């Protein structure tokens, strides 16, 4: 994989993201599991097949002994950047954002992993943070949710939408699954709420209106997705997420 003239465009705890001409290369830490790298590329390729507007996966290989994924580079600005730059247009961006998510949810990809299975594993992995009673309540709530097979992004937020001259592109499909769209929407609400309660409420209201979904139904997913987010083990989020997990019933 050629990394000549590379430009660092993002840095995360377990990966570095570079632009190399018309290519984006994610270079993962040596400690990052090989299976996770291939699974991310496979998820991305499967979502590509739905016809959604996303960058194409070009290559999976090693560079300097580290696994890397090369993808098509999309020139543009993220919706998060545009929202900050043009606060007077936030409502317009939010309309476009929700429409994109509903487009994603309209697709099927039968070979993607199931959202419920992933959430079960994530809840089980919190044995050190949540006691058996809390985990049982979360499992019971999850088990009672309707089983759907819609494509779910899993990390859908404005920083994962690039607005280019060719249109809007959705990036970072490492968490993609098939499942219940309201579970995916609850995660998006939570990601907004970690940054801005105002934007979170604006998003929730618009998503429920456009999808004709009861707000209370999406809210029922919040303790579950808060537990899923807790598996990232970010100290800055722990107190906020714990409050959501403690919520058993919404008024």
Image: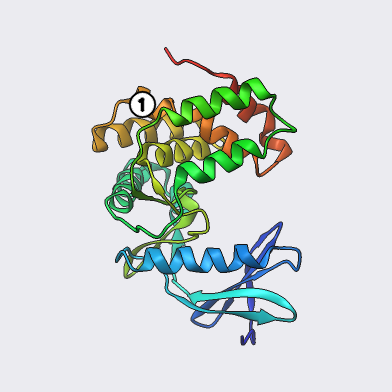
Q: Residue at x 50, y 25 (%)?
A: 140
Decide: is 208 above or below 65.
above
Nearer-the-camera pick, 102 or 85: 102
Looking at the figure, which quarter contains the N terminus? bottom right
Nearer-the-camera pick, 197 or 128: 128
Place of residue 74 in the rendered image (x, y in percent of width and height, measured from the top left): 44, 71
Neighbour tally class for label 1: few under 14, some 14-19, many 20 plus, Cα within 10 Å: some
Q: Residue tagged by mark 1? A: 217
Q: How is the image coloured?
A: rainbow
Q: Residue at x 36, y 41 (%)?
A: 181
Answer with left or right where residue 95 lies relative to residue 172: left
Tell me the SS state at disc 1. Answer: helix
Place of residue 144 in the rendered image (x, y in percent of width and height, measured from the top left): 41, 27
Number of labelled discs? 1
Decide: is 161 above or below 9.
above
Looking at the figure, which quarter contains the C terminus? top left
Answer with left or right where residue 206 lies relative to residue 191: left
Q: Residue at x 36, y 22 (%)?
A: 216
Q: Quadrant of residue 234?
A: top right
Place of residue 100 in the rendered image (x, y in percent of width and height, measured from the top left): 32, 52
Answer with left or right where residue 75 lies relative to residue 137: left
Q: Quadrant of residue 44?
A: bottom left
Q: Residue at x 43, y 53 (%)?
A: 79
Answer with left or right where residue 166 lies relative to residue 123: left
Place of residue 200 in the rendered image (x, y in percent of width and height, measured from the top left): 45, 33
Q: Residue furthest top?
A: 251
Q: Quadrant of residue 185?
A: top left
């Amino acid at each position: 994989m050629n990394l000549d003239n590379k430009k660092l465009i993002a840095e995360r705890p377990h990966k570095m993201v570079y632009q190399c001409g018309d290519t984006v290369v994610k270079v993962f830490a040596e400690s990052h599991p090989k299976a996770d790298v291939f699974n991310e590329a496979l998820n991305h390729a499967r979502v590509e097949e739905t016809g959604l507007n996303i960058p194409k996966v070009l290559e999976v290989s090693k560079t300097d002994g580290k696994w890397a994924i090369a993808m098509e580079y999309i020139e543009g600005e993220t919706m998060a950047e545009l929202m900050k730059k043009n606060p007077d247009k936030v409502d317009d961006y939010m309309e476009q954002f929700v429409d994109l998510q509903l487009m994603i949810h309209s697709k099927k990809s039968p070979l993607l992993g199931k959202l419920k299975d992933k959430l079960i594993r994530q809840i089980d992995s919190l044995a050190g943070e949540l006691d058996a009673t809390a985990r049982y309540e979360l499992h019971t709530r999850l088990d009672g949710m309707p089983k759907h097979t819609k494509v779910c992004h899993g990390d859908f937020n404005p920083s994962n939408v690039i607005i280019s001259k060719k249109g809007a592109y959705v990036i970072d499909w490492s968490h993609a699954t098939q499942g219940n769209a309201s579970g995916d929407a609850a995660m998006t609400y939570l990601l907004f709420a970690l940054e801005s309660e105002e934007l979170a409420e604006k998003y929730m209201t618009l998503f429920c209106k456009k999808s004709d979904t009861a707000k209370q139904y999406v809210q029922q997913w919040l303790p579950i997705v808060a537990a899923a987010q807790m598996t990232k083990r970010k100290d800055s989020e722990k107190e906020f997420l714990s409050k959501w997990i403690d919520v058993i019933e919404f008024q």
